[in-house]
Image (tube, rainbow, N blue to C red):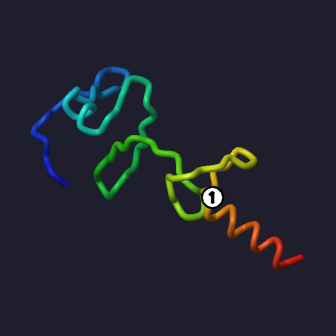
Amino acid sequence: MKSTGIVRKVDELGRVVIPIELRNKFNIAVKDPIEIYVDGSSIVLKKYEPNCIFCGSTKDLIEYKDKLVCAKCAENLNDAKENNE
């Protein structure tokens, strides 16, 4: 992980401001969802990108029963269903 040299304090509500330079670099706009990960002793913030529940793809997503599935996995599921009939 590369240090940016930027240090911010956590406020009394636990918030940290992400500097505009970093928001611009990662195309993070106001109200964009951010995922929070823990990696060992590090906290990692990542712009949220919806993805397929099976393969993790972020392209050609279809919503089915409140879950996201990519077109390729949806086709594979359809093929599997046809083979079982």
Q: Residue furthest left?
A: 5
Q: Which residue lies furthest to the right in this view?
A: 85
- The quarter of the picture where residue 76 lies is bottom right
Dot 1: within a 10 Å radius of its alpha carbon, few (fewer than 14), some, or many (20 or more) residues?
A: some
* Secondary structure state at the residue bearing disc 1: helix
Q: Which residue lies furthest to the top in this view?
A: 12
Looking at the image, which is closer to me, 82 or 18? 82
In the image, what residue occupies the spot 42% across and 37% down? Answer: 34
Read off the residue under disc 1. Answer: 71
Q: Provide residue 74's location: percent of width, then percent of height.
A: 68, 61
Q: Measured along the vertical axis of the image, is residue 30 above or below residue 50?
A: above
Q: Provide residue 43's location: percent of width, then percent of height.
A: 32, 46
Q: Measured along the vertical axis of the image, is residue 55 above or below residue 48?
A: below
In the image, what residue occupies the spot 55% across and 64% down? Answer: 55
Q: Provide residue 46's location: percent of width, then percent of height.
A: 36, 44
| Quadrant (top left, top right, bottom left, bottom right) of the C terminus | bottom right
Q: Provide residue 53's location: percent of width, then percent of height.
A: 60, 57
Give amino acid for label 1.
Answer: Ala
